[in-house]
């Protein structure tokens, strides 16, 4: 068992792969079962379920950034090879490029499904205006959460245990030019991923 836990690729522990994919699937499960239980009921008819939905939404929001965080996994390819040919091909372990690419690409279906399903849910319960506004608001928040994970190594539960530290960190992102550029570019790219996927799938809400 110990040897399995110690397995790694380019010093990247394989158990982390399982863990990160699991975290990315949680918001998808939450929104799937929430939508399944709610059905086509309208918000104003859900008196007993209103608080339950708000709690489920907050839990979903808590885990959702883990989907976009998968996109950043390709950074583990930096300096992954010590034996490059003149064509930038690694003679020993070129398969690692494909491994980390596929691993990161899991973020696309989980990111899109989790947000799109919640958008659909908002449309059926709250109306089209709220549904349209949801991804516009959620994506920048997701960017901040991804930056938390990349630069400060914060975890999702730090929202509960270290909220003031997180708020100070957010403020620093908007006062530091480099961090602000990162925020703007990452947010723009997440918008592109979401809306281009929606367009390609011809997913009309």
Image (tube, helix red, strand yellow):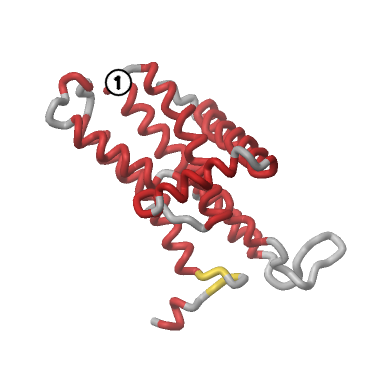
User: Percent x, y for residue 139?
Assistant: 49, 35
Which residue sits at x=62%, y=71%?
10
Q: Is 123 situated above or below 87?
A: above
- 186 or 163, which is in the foreground? 163
Image quarter where the C terminus lies is top left
* Residue 18 seen in render: yes
User: Percent x, y for residue 146?
Assistant: 52, 47
Q: Quadrant of residue 35?
A: top left
Describe residue 160's horizontal placement relative to residue 151 as left or right.
Answer: left
Q: Is 57 situated above or below 39?
A: below
Give the labeled residue for mark 1: 126
- 85 or 104, which is in the foreground? 104
Q: Residues within 10 Å of mark 1 (few under 14, many from 20)?
A: some
Which residue sits at x=55%, y=48%?
147
Q: Secondary structure at mark 1?
A: helix
Q: Quadrant of residue 15?
A: bottom left
Which residue sits at x=19%, y=30%?
50
User: Percent x, y for residue 38?
Assistant: 21, 31
Which residue sits at x=36%, y=32%?
118
Badge count:
1
User: Percent x, y for residue 68?
Assistant: 51, 45
Image quarter where the N terminus lies is bottom left
* Residue 102 seen in render: no
The furthest residue to the left: 48
Describe residue 104's horizontal placement relative to residue 130 as left or right.
Answer: right
Q: Is 181 situated above or below 71?
A: above
Q: Quadrant of residue 101?
A: bottom right
């Amino acid at each position: 068992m110990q040897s399995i836990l110690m397995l790694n690729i380019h010093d990247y522990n394989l158990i982390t792969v399982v863990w990160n994919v699991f975290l990315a699937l949680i918001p998808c499960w939450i929104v799937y079962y929430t939508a399944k239980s709610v059905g086509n009921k309208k918000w104003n008819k859900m008196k007993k379920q209103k608080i339950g939905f708000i709690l489920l939404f907050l839990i979903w929001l808590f885990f959702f950034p883990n989907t976009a965080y998968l996109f950043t996994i390709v950074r583990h390819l930096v300096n992954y090879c010590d034996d490059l040919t003149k064509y930038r091909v690694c003679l020993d372990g070129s398969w690692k490029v494909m491994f980390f690419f596929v691993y990161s690409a899991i973020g696309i279906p989980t990111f899109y499904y989790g947000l799109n399903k919640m958008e659909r849910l908002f449309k059926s319960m709250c109306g089209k205006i709220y549904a349209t506004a949801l991804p516009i608001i959620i994506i920048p928040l997701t960017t901040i959460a991804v930056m938390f994970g990349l630069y400060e190594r914060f975890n999702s539960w730090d929202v509960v245990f270290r909220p003031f530290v997180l708020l100070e960190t957010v403020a620093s992102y908007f006062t530091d030019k480099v961090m602000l550029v990162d925020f703007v570019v990452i947010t723009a790219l997440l918008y592109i991923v979401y809306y281009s996927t929606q367009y390609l799938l011809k997913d009309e809400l």
